Amino acid sequence: MATLNPGLPLLQQAEVKDKVVLLRVDHNVIKKGKIKDAFRIDSSLGTIVNILARGGKPVLMTHVGRPYDKKSNTFTFDSNSDVTPLAAYLEQKLCCKVGLIEQPLPSPGQGLTLDKKAADAALDKLKSGRTQLLYLPNTRTLTGEESKGPERQKLAQTLAGLADLYVNDAFGSWQPHASTYDVARYLPSYAGFLLQAELLGLTQALEPERPFLAVVAGSKYDTKIGPVTALYEQADRLALGGVVYNTYLCAKYGVKIEGVEENDIALARQLVEMDRRQGKIVEFSHIVESDSLERKEGGCRVRAVADMKTGESLRLALDVAAQSFSHPEVKKVFREARTIFINAVMGLTPNFPEGSQALYEIAGQNKDARKLYGGGDTLEQIKELNPAQYLRALDDAKSYFFTGGGSVLTALEQRSAYGLEPVKALMGEIKPL
């Protein structure tokens, strides 16, 4: 049974009564000013409620969207970067009052610096019980969050100055920024309940019951080469989807598929060569070729991989055909697996959903396997395409949904659940200034 590293400080070990607790969460779920999917928020409620129940005063912070343009060093403030919907959701969900720091926006293009007077006023309401939670502005609108040097350290010190201790529950926010990493320099720091659960899930993927089947997809091969290579070495069988699978097909069969770049094909040849020796890749027998990104009558067709000829050029390959999952070898691999990790959308949704739907269905049919689903697009698509299966999985002790797909792949590439920089910071492994 998976256990946590004893060197990780845990929230349940912290004394929080009458303490202000700076809590980093991953509530990056705002689209067009509204909450698109509350799964990540709901996943953090256990930590929030525990702090409240033990008399703590939570100060929440999260990033939302990408309001900071690194190239131009400018910030944009709009509905996509506003945490107000998050505060309103928590008020309704927890039946409590959530405070916000009320201060004017900076000049156009400039980042936000927390106004001490406004922050003190908001903290006073929290400490006196007039509010039960305080939600800070979007961390990515704060000057220094993604910077290096004095600005970043000044922000980390400002954030730390608001609280008595720090809790990180933001598994999806794996990059070392001021609010996820540097704050741990200045406060006693602990892992929240969600972060603990995610690390246990990672341990199950890194130390799986075998046979271990991994399924990975992506829109570009070079961004997935690290995780794909690592999973190839760790898994007993590996299945690919999306452009990653298209790139593999080009490299193996010498075909050209529209949208697949030559440099990616060159990279994929390394995987093809590895598989010639070890034979781990589960090939899907058919793909869906289309003349356009839209699904038009007469404009798409199912192509058999076995019929492809060297030098042949294909149009857009936008899905793994659903019939591929009926192939005896594919069914056998999914049926016999004892751990299944899925971080994959097989086709270009919403117009080409059949491959993803078939993938989630065949995985769900294996009742004995531990199933670990990556966050992000995988979570979104399984909820939309297979809602009944999603609901069953939520009640299944052998199934787990990660809240951060990129975090999972990064950890698997590092071959460690504790190699993510924010996690290392909690364990005291923080780089000197």
Image (cartoon, grey):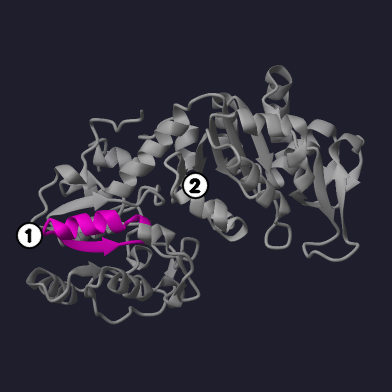
Q: Position of residue 89 (x, y in %)?
A: 35, 72
Image vertical order of residue 157 relative to residue 266, above or below: below
Q: Nearer the viewer, mark 1 or mark 2?
A: 1
Q: Position of residue 167 (x, y in %)?
A: 23, 51
Q: Quadrant of residue 134?
A: bottom left
Say which residue label 2 marks.
406
Residue 376 lies in the magenta-colored region: no
Three-letter residue code for mark 1: Asp
Say which residue label 1 marks.
18
Q: Quadrant of residue 397?
A: top left
* Residue appearing at x 73%, y 62% in the figure: 351
- Magenta segment boundaries in residue numbering: 43-62
Q: Position of residue 20 (x, y in %)?
A: 13, 60
* Residue appearing at x 63%, y 32% in the figure: 335
Element marked by disc 2: helix
Q: Position of residue 400 (x, y in %)?
A: 45, 44
Closer to the N terminus: mark 1 or mark 2? 1
User: For this rendering, which residue is in front, 393 or 114?
Assistant: 393
Three-letter residue code for mark 2: Gly
Image vertical order of residue 400 relative to residue 128, above or below: above
Whether residue 165 is visible to the viewer of this picture, yes or no, is yes
Left or right of 139 in this view: 356: right
Residue 57 lies in the magenta-colored region: yes
